[in-house]
Image (cartoon, coloured by chain):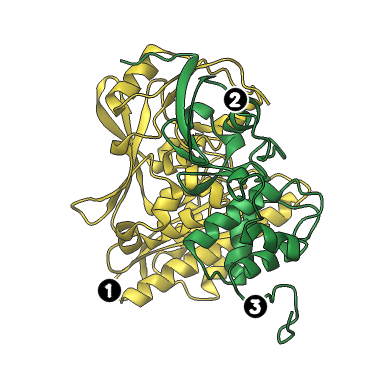
Amino acid sequence: MLARSLRYARPTSVAEAVGLLAEHPGARPLAGGQSIVNVLKLRAAEVDALIDISRLQELRGVRATPDGGVEIGAGTRYVDLARDPLLLERNPLAAEVAGGLVDVQVRNRGTIGGNVCLNDPTSNFPPLLVALGGRIRVASAGGGDREVPAEQFFVGPYRCALAQGELVRAIVLPPLHDGEGAGYATLQLARDSWALARGAAWVRRGADGTVEAARVVVACIAPRPARQHAIEAALIGTRGEEPGLLAATAGALEGVDAIADSHASAEYRMEMAREYARRAIRQALGQTEAAA
Amino acid sequence: MSDPETTHLVRTRVNGEEVERVVQARQLLVHYLRDTLAMKGTHIGCDTGNCGACTVLLDGEPVKSCMMLAVQADGSELKTVESLSPAGADLSELQQAFKDQHALQCGWCTPGMLMQAKALLERDPDPDVETIRRTLKGNICRCTGYVNIVRAIQQAAGQEVTAGKPEGVRA
């Protein structure tokens, strides 16, 4: 398939890239291209120009932040995240998620910035970033960056909080302190494959072992990663043991809109979202035990 | 500031040869290889980024050439299936293994399978079956059921060919 005629530029800095995006309202950033190239082939969007940011070294790599967390350059490819020593040390779950995305070829091109900006309901990183309390650092032609909490960044299917002319510069993950743990669990058709339901969780235990704080998210069955405040509230003050955990995750889910298709009914997806949220919570709790 | 343009000069090294062409910005890498350079070894399967028939090596790494613009390959080293055995030469060990193990029927996915397998064996000369199978996730074959492809890669790796056999049974 042939894309509509378009223009292409390869700026040499983020400043130049956001300048071009601001100057050309019909322009869109091109990173790994693992989604937008298909969109262009299908002529499903009006794009006059592509601003290729895939070679900008300032968007690549994982850096340590002084608080013990990490700042991940938006243009870092999945394959590089999966083997990054700093990420493996400070947030191994994020590295593992990157290493299980789609297939070898997509991991060699696709970037975490593209993943969060596409915000497909089945995208891997959005629910993880919400559970981890991540922030999205956004650059624009106006100068200074702004930071958007992940929870506010993911607006709806294929929509995020970026304005025209803005570019994601980095994804910032807070540190995982002692007593904190994160989990991520997906029901998928096969390994590295399309997801039907997904849960992501973060917990913090107090010195007495009870849960002090939690973030629980379900995805794939929701227009955006859906925080489950009722489940979080039910976990706090408990040790997250059975059968309390089962009861805490048995109620209605918030902010979800499951669809039925050839793979599964809406009811099945909903039930699996509960189950995979439960698994993510168990994983997160298990990590805190390991740390204690 | 470099303004966006509809045509670009693209310099690449394709199977060891320096190639320079002016391309349209919208041209896909797979069309550049097949149409502009008349190298028909790389196949277009699904044209949606799912099947992997168009897999080529970009600076040594497998990528789907239908999911990339030709202009994005500027300055890169490309390897296509044609690089495995030059015209008139014997089949490479990997190609011979595909032939020996009947790892193809219609052959449409084969160029992508071969390039994926070549990159795997360069990265990991002694992969286990699980690694081989997981690596092929982005390469779809509708004929073979994959077992013979896994066997071919085992043969090319110099391993005992065990895939598809019950445990304890020799090939």
> For the residue marked with disc 2, what is the amino acid?
Leu
The quadrant in which residue A191 appears is bottom right
> For the residue marked with disc 3, what is the amino acid?
Glu
* Left-right relation of A168 to B5: left
**Residue B52 image offset from top left, x and y in percent:** 65, 46
**Residue B33 image offset from top left, x and y in percent:** 60, 32
- Pointer 2 local density, CA inside 10 Å: few below 14, some 14–19, many at least 20: many
Give the chain letter at badge 3: B
* Left-right relation of A216 to B150: left
Name the residue that disc number 1 marks: A207
> For the residue marked with disc 1, what is the amino acid?
Ala
Whether marks 1 and 3 lie on the same chain: no
- Colour used to depict chain A in the structure image: yellow
Give the chain letter at badge 2: A
**Residue A7 image offset from top left, x and y in percent:** 49, 16
Classify mark 1: helix, strand or loop: loop
> Which marked residue is nearer to the observer: mark 3 or mark 2?
3
Tell me if residue A111 can be seen: yes
Which chain is painted in green? B
> Which marked residue is nearer to the observer: mark 1 or mark 2?
2
Name the residue that disc number 3 marks: B160
The residue shown at (69%, 61%) is B96
**Residue A59 image offset from top left, x and y in percent:** 32, 38
Q: In which quarter of the image is the C terminus of chain A?
A: bottom left
Q: Nearer the viewer, residue B113 or A114?
A: B113
Name the residue that disc number 2 marks: A40
Q: Nearer the viewer, residue B28 or A84?
A: B28
Is A75 rendered above or below residue B3? below
